[in-house]
Image (cartoon, rainbow, N blue to C red):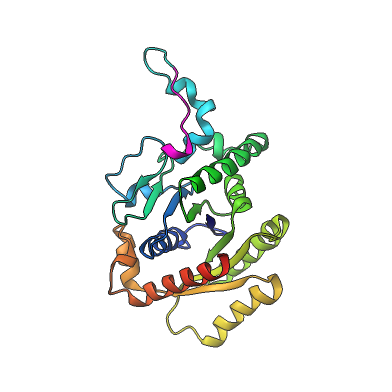
């Protein structure tokens, strides 16, 4: 099983859109795929996959001990902690695509959203164990949509990743912030087993090819990070996401779908 993590320097880059569409593309090609909403600051799967009601959320694996008093039955009988196999539910849009939701009302400063380094050391061990359990369940790909910036839970996800896709909007702040992120975080974590990629998202139409090439050279030559995809602005894509629709399902967005499929093809080639 390969773990692919979606990350960004700041929010609003469209990484969730890309993560879900790439997960769908893997599933459509016959790979058993698990997409995890690990953007704990602002989880979105629940608003996109309306009507799905998982018994457990991603947070429950790590925060059970912290919250077990609140989870006790009225009769005082203590509930058992969830196991990784208890989390996935089918997406109902693709047979090969399962989902893991995050807590819809995040509690900042608590559990995975705390700055308690000791807690996160234990959480990393639990995450590694969970990865192994998901692999035993037969998943080929695990897609994780993480919180942006230097979030401790996101750092743990990057540590277990086989590949990271760092999504940015190509403007002055996006390029500078992503450069900082790679220098200060990704370089520190190393890339012995992990492959890092850049995705330029929401690129303005008619952007000069020379400028796009400069962006790619900046990350490749200075930071040794390859560009895996360039996604142009598309009003149809933006409108669909405004209503929580999954873009790859709509054939009118052919350019977007082609980019998604090329990214999947590249990941398949590099990771297998």
86 to the left or right of 195: left
| Quadrant of residue 219 within the rendered picture | bottom right
Q: Residue furthest top?
A: 75
Taking depth in this image into account, of 269 and 125 the one nearest to the observer is 269
Secondary structure that dominates the magenta span: loop
> Quick check: 27 above or below 222?
above
> Quick check: 33 above or below 168?
above
| Quadrant of residue 22 within the rendered picture | bottom left
Residue 105: give x, y in percent of width and height. 42, 38
Does residue 81 show up magenta in the picture? yes
Quarter of the image where the C terminus is located: bottom right
Tally of numbered tags: 0
Does residue 193 show up magenta in the picture? no
Identify which residue is drawn at 29% across, 51% down.
92
Taking depth in this image into account, of 135 and 143 the one nearest to the observer is 135
Taking depth in this image into account, of 17 and 108 the one nearest to the observer is 17
110 to the left or right of 90: right
Taking depth in this image into account, of 175 and 55 the one nearest to the observer is 55
156 to the left or right of 52: right
Identify which residue is drawn at 30% across, 60% down.
245
Magenta region, residue range: 78-86
> Quick check: 218 above or below 90?
below
| Quadrant of residue 165 within the rendered picture | bottom right
The answer, for residue 40, to whether it is visible in the render is no
Residue 258: give x, y in percent of width and height. 39, 76
Residue 162: give x, y in percent of width and height. 59, 58
Residue 119: give x, y in percent of width and height. 63, 34
The answer, for residue 260, to whether it is visible in the render is yes
Identify which residue is drawn at 42% across, 81% down.
205
């Amino acid at each position: 099983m390969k773990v692919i993590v979606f990350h960004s320097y700041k929010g609003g880059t469209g990484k969730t859109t890309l993560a879900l569409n790439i997960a769908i593309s893997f599933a459509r090609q016959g790979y058993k795929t698990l997409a995890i909403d690990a953007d704990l600051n602002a989880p979105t799967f629940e608003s996109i996959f309306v009507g799905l009601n998982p018994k457990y959320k991603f947070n429950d694996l790590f925060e059970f001990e912290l919250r077990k008093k609140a989870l006790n039955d009225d009769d005082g009988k203590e509930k058992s902690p969830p196991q990784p196999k208890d989390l996935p539910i089918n997406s109902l849009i693709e047979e090969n695509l399962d989902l893991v939701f995050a807590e819809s009302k995040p509690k900042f400063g608590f559990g995975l959203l705390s700055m308690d380094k000791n807690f996160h050391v234990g959480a990393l061990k639990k995450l590694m164990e969970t990865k192994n359990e998901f692999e035993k369940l037969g998943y080929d790909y695990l897609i994780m949509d993480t919180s942006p910036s230097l979030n401790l839970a996101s750092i743990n996800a990057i540590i277990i990743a086989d590949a990271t896709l760092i999504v940015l909007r190509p403007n002055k702040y996006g390029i500078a912030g992503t450069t900082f992120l790679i220098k200060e975080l990704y370089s520190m974590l190393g890339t012995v087993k992990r492959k890092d990629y850049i995705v330029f998202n929401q690129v303005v139409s008619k952007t000069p090819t020379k400028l796009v090439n400069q962006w790619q050279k900046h990350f490749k030559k200075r930071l040794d990070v390859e560009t895996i995809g360039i996604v142009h602005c598309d009003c149809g894509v933006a409108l669909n996401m405004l209503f929580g629709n999954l873009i790859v399902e709509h054939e009118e967005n052919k350019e977007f779908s082609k980019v998604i499929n090329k990214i999947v093809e590249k990941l398949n080639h590099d990771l297998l």
